[in-house]
Image: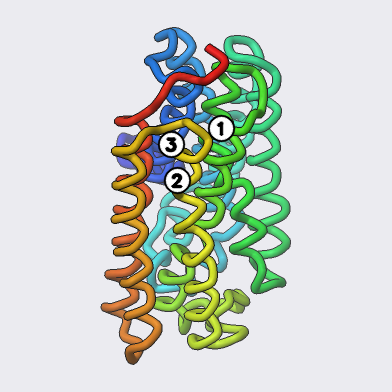
Amino acid sequence: MTLAYLRDLFELTKPRITLLVLVISFTGMYMAQAKMPDFELVFFTLLGLALASSSSSSLNNYIDRGIDLIMDRTQKRALPQKRVIPKHALVMGVLMGLSSFVVLSWKVNLLTASLSSFALVAYILIYTIWLKRTSEHCTVIGGVAGALPPVMGLTAVNNEIGIVALVMFAILFLWQPPHFWALALMRADEYKRAGIPMLPVVKGPEVTKQQMLIYTLILVPCSLSPWYFGMSGTTFLIAAIVLGLVYLGWTIHFIRTEFTPQASRRLFLFSIFYIAALYSAMIFDCLPPISS
C-alpha cells in the first residue's frame, strides 16, 4: 500500500470536518465545568469522537461515490476517480465506527458512546441513504446528528444531558440549515443534475432565501441563551449580540439582492466565522455552573 494510497484513504475521513467536530466537542467539555477537564478524559473523548467522525465521512464517501462523480465539487475525490478500492473505504469506515464505540464506552462513559453511535447511524442511514435522496427536509432533519458534538463533549464530563447541553445543541442545530443552504444555492445545478432534492432544487432560490432568514431570525435570540441561563457573562452577551446582528443584516441583504454565487459563498464563509466566534466567546467568558 503506497503513501499516495494512504493519503487518499485519509482524505476520505474529511479531516477538516473532523477537526471542526473536535473543536466544538471540546467547547462542550470546557463548558461543563468552566475549566479545563482532566487531560486523559479529553484525550480519549476526542479520540473516540475523531474515530466516529472519520467513520461517518468514510462511509458517506463510499455511499455517495456515484453521486460525487456527477458533481463538479466532488468528482475529483478518491472514490469517484477510482484511486481507492470501495471495499477498503467501507471496511475502514466500519472499523473506525466500532473502535469509536469501544473507546468511548471503555474510557469515557456509555452515554457519550451511545450518543456518538446514534449520530453516526443517523447520519449514514437516515440522512445519507434515505433523506438526502428523497426529501428537501434532509438538511434540517440531518442537522440533529450534526448538532450533537457539543452535547457529547458535555456528557463526557458530566455523564448527563442538562440545560447547558440543550442550549449548545439548539444553537448549532439552528445554525446549520442556513449555513448549508448557502452552499446548496451555489451548487443547485449540480444537485439537480445528480438528482439530489435539496431545498433550492425543489422549492427554488426565493423559498430557500426565506427559510434562511427564518432560521437566522430564530438563531440570533437563541444565541443569547448561554447568558440567560448563566453559562456565560456580559462579555459573551455583547459578542453574541454584535455577531448576531451582523449575521442577520448580511442575511437580509443577501435575500433582498439579486442572487450571485459569489454572494452566496461570502455568506457561507461568514456563517463559519460566526459560529466559530460565538463558541470562542462562550469559552472566553464561561461561568462556573450554579450548582458548583
- Residue at 64% of width from left, 64% of height from top? 138
Name the mark nearer the viewer: 3 or 2.
3
- Residue at 38% of width from left, 68% of height from top? 248
- What residue does disc 2 label? 12
Residue nearest the viewer, comparing 265 with 128:
265
- Provide the secondary structure element on which disc 1 rests: helix
* Marker count (numbered): 3
- Provide the secondary structure element on which disc 3 rests: helix
Q: Pinpoint residue 136: horizontal percent, then vertical percent.
A: 65, 73
Label 3: how many residues lie within 10 Å, few (<14), some (14-19) or many (20+)?
Answer: many
Q: Is residue 185 visible?
A: yes
Dividing the picture into quadrants, the one containing residue 148 is top right
Estimate the spatial distance between the alpha carbons at disc 3 and disc 1, rounded to whole Å.
14 Å
- Residue at 45% of width from left, 8% of height from top? 40
- What residue does disc 3 label? 24
The amino acid sitting under disc 2 is Leu
- Provide the secondary structure element on which disc 2 rests: loop
Q: Could you tell which of marks 3 and 1 lies nearer the N-terminus?
A: 3
- What residue does disc 1 label? 164
Q: Considering only vertical position in the picture, is 175 above or below 29?
A: below
Q: Could you tell which of marks 3 and 2 lies nearer the N-terminus?
A: 2
The answer to whether 18 appears left or right of 110 in the picture is left
Q: Is residue 8 visible?
A: no
Estimate the spatial distance between the alpha carbons at disc 3 and disc 2, rounded to whole Å.
21 Å
